[in-house]
Image (cartoon, rainbow, N blue to C red):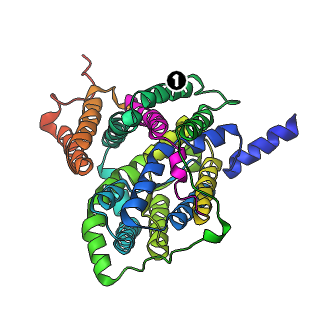
Amino acid sequence: MPHIANARSAQFKCGLRFDRREISGAFGDLGTDLPLLAGVILASGMDSGWTFVLFGLMQIAAGVIYGIPMPVQPLKAVAALVIAHQLDPSVISGGAFSIAVIMLVLTLAGAIDGLARLIPRSVIRGVQFGLGLSLGWLALSKYLPSHGISGWLLSVTCLTILLVFKREKRFPGAIMVLLIGVTYALSTGADPGTLSPFSMHFQAPAVPAPQDLWLGLILLALPQVPLSIGNSMLATRQLADDWFPERRVTLRKIGVTYSMFNFIAALCGGIPVCHGSGGMAGQYAFGGRTGGTVVINGLFYLGIGVACFFGFNDIVALFPLPVLGAILLIESITLMTCVRDTLQPRFDGAIALSVGLIAFWLPNGFLIGMMVGALAEALRRFPFSGTILQSEPTKQ
């Protein structure tokens, strides 16, 4: 029917579609975001309802702005530091402001584009491979075994469903897995809280003082910026070029929205955020192809936030870690397989795998890996390296 085909084409061109595949894709990044958000809220004392609401609104904005699965994610290094040191919300706001200023200056000055020219494709693939290894290790070491034998059985069941129904449009695997997780949580005694219209509360955002801005810069911004340049900017733009070349996503656009979202987080008391190749890979792997995926994801977090306002402060318990771990493992595999296009020529593949292993194993590994990979690529361009580091064998 022509009019239906035209309507679907128009939906895709405008960048928003809301079918079952988009709904499934919306939960492809759940295994990363939800535990980090919950961990930061518990460690810092941030208002749970407002944090989820603001995070959901930024997701919706990203979906509308980009028209592709360009999710908003908690900054991983920031989240880890906040959880480890139990930093105050005002310091978190100071960190978000410092990160926003640094990334906006780098973007408007053209420094990000300069780095993109200096850092070759093989190094970017290595960053993606390293992030995939990190996420996979987190899933295998922390999430999947968290509930003992029953948790392993649950995670294996979820992984099987996700793999079997990976390309199924009518019964997306991610939705089935989430329903199984909620059923398991309720059957094992999880209590999301009791609805009480009179318990609605709101905690005013923490305004950062000058010392909070300084602490946020030293403790949060400086450790995060190298990872953001590699994963949130360069690797994310690479995936957007790979999967959505018609959208022509630029580094400048990514840098501006990245900075704007963190200015909002700093001023409104939200968690510092980024765009990320891992989130895009996860949502793409589960069927997301338009910005509708991110809008749906945002509405999900918006709903959690509203529920928290009314007393459902333990609603996160409805999403067991083994289920989140299964989703996270699929996301990590999708990221790691991006390295395939560098395996030939062999030297590109060696650089990508080396960068990935460095990023995974070493402290500040993403920064070190990018530097080592860029140096190796530069060395092979020198005349003396021509006979040793040739990407392709010389034909006689």
The answer to if 337 sits in the magenta stretch is: yes
Residue at x-position 36% and y-position 57%: 79
In the image, 59 versus 116, the foreground residue is 59
Residue shown at the point (54%, 64%) measured from the top left: 49
Residue 334, located in which quarter of the rendered image? top left
Question: What amino acid is labelled 1 in the image?
Answer: Thr
- The 10 Å Cα crowd at callout 1, few under 14, some 14 to 19, many 20 or more, is some
The foreground one among 119 and 268 is: 268
Looking at this rendering, what residue extends furthest in the top direction?
396
The quarter in which the N terminus is drawn is top right
Compare residues 132 and 344 and report the one nearer the observer: 132
Residue 388, position in %: x, y?
Answer: 15, 28
- Residue beneath the point at 39% across and 31% down: 148
Q: Is residue 152 left or right of residue 193?
A: left
Q: Give the range drawn in magenta.
A: 311-340
Q: In this view, does 195 lie to the left or right of 190?
A: right
Is residue 238 visible from the viewing direction of this image?
Answer: no
- Residue at (56, 47) in percent of width and height: 69
The correct choice, above or below, for 306 with respect to 320 in the image is below
- Classified by dominant secondary structure, the portion drawn in magenta counts as helix
| Residue receiving disc 1 | 160
Give percent across and percent down for residue 270: 47, 67
Instruction: Tell me where residue 294 appears, x and y as whole percent.
Output: 59, 51
Image quarter hosting the C terminus = top left
